[in-house]
Amino acid sequence: MIDTRRRNLVVAAVLLAMLLAALDQTIVSTALPTMVADLGGGAHLSWVVTSYLLAETIMTVLIGKFGDLYGRKKAFVVSVALFLVGSFFAGWSESMGVLIAFRAVQGLGAGGLMVTSTAIIADVVPLRERGKFQGFAGAVFGIATVAGPLLGGLFVDHLSWRWAFYVNIPLGIAVVLVALAALPATRTGARPAIDYAGIALIALAATGLTLVTSWGGTEYAWTSPTILWMAAVSVVLLVAFVFVEQRAAEPMLPMRLFRSRVFTVSGILSFVVGFAMLGGITYLPIYMQYVRGESATSSGLWMLPLIAGLMATALLTGTVISRTGRYRAFPLAGSAGLAAGLFLLSRLDAGTSYWVMGAFMVVLGAGIGLVMQVPVIVVQSTTSYTDLGVATSGISFLRTIGSSFGVAIFGRIYANRLPAHVEVPPGIDPRAVASPAAVHALPEAVRAPIAAGYAETVQTMFLTAAPIGLVALAVALFLPQVQLRDTARAAAAGNSGVGESFAAPPSSSYDELRKLVSTVAARSGVDPGPAVLRRSGGDLPLEQAWLLGRVYRASIDDGVATLAEIGAMTEVPGGIFEPTARALVRSGHLVPHDRGYRFTDRGAEVFTQLVGAWRRWLLEQLQDWHEPDQRDFARALDSFTDELIESGRRMSRV
């Protein structure tokens, strides 16, 4: 482990990187109307969000494997670089096509940042302290969900929509500099099999289906050869994806997961949550700016009731699930709230009061918050260790694909219905209805019917989307009540509202289980080290027990450990450990050697007992996994044991 000051610097840089990636999921929502007015291409508005989400989804699948191959430091720096390149050229764009292309580049960088950031925190923060930092990471996503629309509005009103992207550049450069200077170069030594064929097939299929929903009825007629061929090819690609995944060495989404009723139902619910959340957040500012005449900043502020409802019910849901283990009522109530919220938003018009509008948004947000955590919690409680990583990632993948389709379908309805509802009177420049400010600068007699047309378009969008909540309700009826694992219940309690539910999951079963274990350890509120040390039968102070572990690590090759080697491991002068080593010599656990120290028989026995005591403690925390004999699970336990022993040191006492 690196020293505390350097560790805190790395964690701060990582959290900043996560904040940048999370913000760009929502920061464009309040800026979209102004972007369209400036660049044109309103029919392609949804792709500003969709291209980002699709690219982000694909990169979250790939980057963990690349980190294993080339090292997490390189993967992190490359992800930041991609994000910065995308940010710069997105801000520089002079056409909607260029903006969409570089939003995709941004999405690649953001997907890489989210996954590698989680892995880096695991590399630099001791296991027993990691729950606290995971809470910080969850809070980052909660803050980003609230702050994104508001910041986008502030930039539009006081600078330019381009600053929604330019603001990333100085912050991203700072992250790169810290990463290059302070981030340790770590590699797992693993040579993972990467499912390139599966990833390519699902990426092409998802993009094709999203294009069908975006272009159908707008760019091309639904019965046009372009739409029909694109739909047919996308379906063929989906079938090919299923075929490839059944034969891949390490499939990105194993088809065996869908044999589980719990996974299938949870996946559909995640899809619906993603659909509703970003679909609503992306298009509500259009109503506020075009119909009500709100500034971009004000429209961001008026999104807060939706976010408040979402976060309040998400926190409540996590707390209740943690204490009771009961969860089935939440997706049922949440799906009903989702349908009700979308229907109520379809009643918005130019005369709706602010209080009524806010109440409607609270209903939608509350519905999303009630259901959003449940799929991950339930899947983590029913999946074996072998499939824990891919199952959790699969739920996240389906949620993000749902977001992509939600934004695209909302956008198609918007682009298709707007010309029918908004008619520009003779003698008025059509460009006068392209931006909110221009619409509300028109004379009242001209402005009112145009604003009403935008209101009717938004009403149609939400009314068409409302039945998706009823579909979710029907699906939720099939979700069984199962016994929740203690790790999943602890994760539910520690979830920071939007937090972990909308963050990218760890990329492997090992990383996911390690996150859950650290959450359980942090939740206890008590350092288990002293108690475990007593249970091992030893009477050593904690710092001496820790040094025994370091001596073991340093003496693996030739049986001898030098203080210089131990100092190199901890990045502090080796002489600091001399008093503790002498105390271990006096107690008969170590014996001096001409180059350093080696174990006595007593020292080896005490260390073996210590390892066994930590392993038994871990098994107690994971007793409801029922997998103690599984080889990979046992390796994970041994690795966690090593981490816990390593992190037992107290620098001030050594």
Image: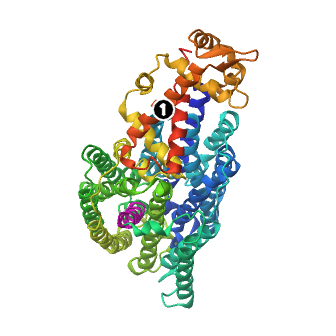
Find residue 366 and report its image quarter: bottom left
Number of residues whose C-alpha sits closer than 10 Å to that of mark 1, classed few (under 14), some (14–19) or many (20 or more): some
Magenta region: 261-280
In the foreground, 527 or 84: 527
Considering only vertical position in the picture, is 71 above or below 25?
above
Q: Secondary structure at mark 1?
A: helix
Image location of residue 171, percent across then percent down: 61, 41
Quadrant showing the N terminus: top right
In the foreground, 567 or 58: 567
Considering only vertical position in the picture, is 401 above or below 552?
below
Image location of residue 508, percent across then percent down: 54, 52
Image location of residue 413, percent across then percent down: 42, 75
Find residue 460 and report its image quarter: bottom left
Quadrant showing the C terminus: top right
Image location of residue 417, percent across then percent down: 41, 78
In the foreground, 199 or 404: 199
Coloring applied to the structure: rainbow
Q: Is residue 57 visible?
A: yes
- Return the residue found at the far front: 601
Instruction: Tell me the kind of residue under disc 1.
Output: Gly
Considering only vertical position in the picture, is 596 above or below 351?
above
* Magenta residue check for 262: yes
Q: Tell me if 465 is positioned left or right of 323 in this view.
A: right
Considering only vertical position in the picture, is 266 above or below 64?
below
Q: Residue at x 55, y 70 (%)?
A: 245
Q: Main secondary structure of the magenta part?
A: helix
Q: Is residue 41 visible?
A: no
Label 1 sits on residue:
612
